[in-house]
């Protein structure tokens, strides 16, 4: 169900932006800053296996995990959200510094500001994807704690 909703959300975004609009939200340097650095920092936390468990819990039915494993999955999602927000702000600051150092005509300024803000967009997109995962795991954790 989660995958279907995620695909429908992506389709709705694509339709709302039109086909040409998709290219406006693709900025590879910003993607590298946000996603690349986020993945590297997340790997350092040692919570990668817990994140994979969180994804499995979201995509499957049933709860075959212990309370500690569910709490570690929540911790992994929380760490990912914090890291992604930090790298999004970092990318925005880098873009703003680059914009401030360059001289633009007023007509070139607005597209450059859009590129500066795209890092925050990528961060918010990752957070929106992980929020339903968090709530599902919290629900499973409550059910598991009530059963005990």
Image: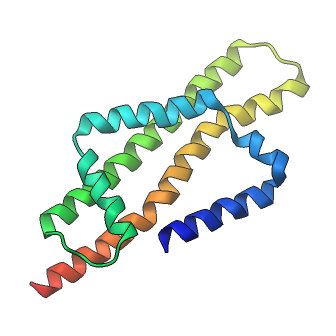
Seen in the picture, residue 87 relative to 10 is either above or below; the reply is above
Describe residue 128's horizontal placement relative to residue 116 as left or right.
Answer: left
Q: Residue at x 57, y 44 (%)?
A: 122
Q: Is residue 87 in view from this perspective?
A: yes
x, y (%) of residue 39? 39, 37
x, y (%) of residue 3? 51, 66
Q: Residue at x 18, y 79 (%)?
A: 144
Q: Residue at x 30, y 52 (%)?
A: 51
Seen in the picture, residue 82 relative to 16 is either above or below; the reply is above
Describe residue 15's horizontal placement relative to residue 79 as left or right.
Answer: right
Q: Is residue 92 in view from this perspective?
A: no
The colour scheme used here is rainbow
Seen in the picture, residue 105 relative to 134 is either above or below; the reply is above
Q: Quadrant of the C terminus?
A: bottom left
Quadrant in the picture for residue 147: bottom left
x, y (%) of residue 132? 44, 67
Describe residue 82's horizontal placement relative to residue 119 as left or right.
Answer: left
Q: Residue furthest left?
A: 148
Q: Residue at x 53, y 45 (%)?
A: 123
Q: Residue furthest bottom?
A: 147
Viewer-nearest residue: 26 or 92: 26
Viewer-nearest residue: 94 or 53: 53
């Amino acid at each position: 169900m989660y995958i279907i909703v995620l695909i429908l959300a992506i389709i709705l975004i694509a339709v709302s932006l039109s086909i040409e609009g998709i290219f406006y939200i693709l900025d590879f340097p910003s993607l590298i800053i946000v996603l690349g650095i986020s993945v590297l920092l997340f790997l350092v936390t040692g919570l990668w296996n817990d994140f994979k468990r969180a994804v499995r819990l979201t995509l499957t039915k049933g709860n075959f995990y212990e309370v500690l494993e569910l709490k570690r999955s929540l911790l992994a999602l929380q760490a990912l959200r914090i890291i992604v927000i930090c790298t999004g702000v970092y990318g925005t600051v880098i873009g703003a510094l680059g914009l401030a150092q360059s001289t633009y005509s007023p007509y070139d300024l607005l597209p450059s500001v859009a590129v500066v803000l795209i890092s925050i967009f990528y961060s918010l997109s990752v957070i929106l994807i992980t929020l339903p995962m968090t709530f599902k795991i919290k629900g499973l954790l409550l059910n598991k704690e009530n059963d005990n």
